[in-house]
Image (spheres, grey):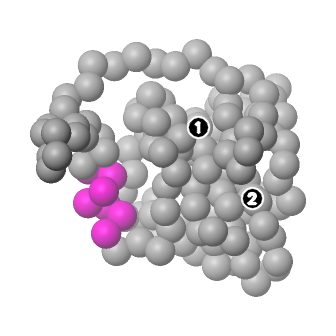
């Protein structure tokens, strides 16, 4: 697995875990998965945003977002901002996130064990929470 910068997004090449998606119809014929609906509700009181790429990776990898994890990411963004970081790798519990500190946006997400023998590029800092 290698991190590749594509535009302003990061892409982690890994074998996706395919799970059946439950969908719910929303306005104008769009569909949202149960995962997206749960994430959206969890993020209501959050400063941090999640890119579509990060949302997809979280769903594929079964990473469930909760208020504790959101709070840790928000704290990490604040700490990284005070140090002048721009793009950081956040290691939180068993998860790893590449975060655009400037935009307060999670760019991609993975399980921490996926980092074994791999390299994450285009970051200027790491935050261990």
Q: Residue at x 68, y 68 (%)?
A: 101
Q: Earlier in the sequence, mark 1 or mark 2?
A: 2
Asked if residue 59 is positioned above or below residue 65 in the image, the reply reads above
Residue 19 lies left or right of residue 117; in this view the side is: left
Asked if residue 15 is positioned above or below residue 54 in the image, the reply reads above
Residue 97 seen in render:
no
Query: Distance of mark 1 from mark 2, alpha carbons?
Result: 14 Å
- Mark 2, Cα crowd under 10 Å, few <14 / some 14-19 / many 20+, is many
Nearer to me, 32 or 129: 32
The quarter of the picture where residue 126 lies is bottom right
Residue pushed farthest front?
28
Q: Is residue 111 magenta?
A: no
Q: Residue at x 67, y 31 (%)?
A: 12
Label 1 sits on a secondary structure element that is strand
Q: Residue at x 67, y 46 (%)?
A: 9
Name the magenta segment's main secondary structure: helix
Q: Quadrant of the C terminus?
A: bottom right
Segment tinted magenta in the rendering: 38-44
Asked if residue 99 is positioned above or below residue 13 in the image, the reply reads below
Q: Which mark is residue 88?
A: 2
Image coordinates for residue 32, horizontal then vertical, percent: 24, 40
Residue 55 lies left or right of residue 117; in this view the side is: left
Residue 24 lies left or right of residue 76; in this view the side is: left
Nearer to me, 94 or 41: 41
Residue 60 lies left or right of residue 122; in this view the side is: left
The residue singled out by tag 1 in the image is: 110
Image coordinates for residue 41, horizontal then vertical, percent: 26, 60
């Amino acid at each position: 697995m290698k991190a590749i910068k594509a535009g302003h997004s990061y892409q982690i090449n890994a074998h996706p875990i395919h799970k059946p998606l439950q969908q719910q119809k929303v306005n104008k014929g769009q569909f949202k998965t149960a995962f997206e609906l749960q994430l959206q509700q969890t993020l209501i009181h959050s400063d941090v945003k999640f890119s579509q790429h990060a949302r997809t990776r979280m769903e594929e990898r079964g990473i469930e977002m909760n208020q504790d994890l959101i709070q840790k990411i928000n704290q990490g963004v604040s700490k990284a901002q005070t140090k002048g970081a721009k793009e950081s790798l956040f290691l939180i519990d068993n998860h790893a996130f590449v975060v655009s500190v400037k935009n307060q946006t999670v760019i991609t997400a993975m399980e921490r064990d996926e980092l074994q023998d791999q390299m994450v590029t285009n970051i200027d800092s790491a935050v261990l929470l």
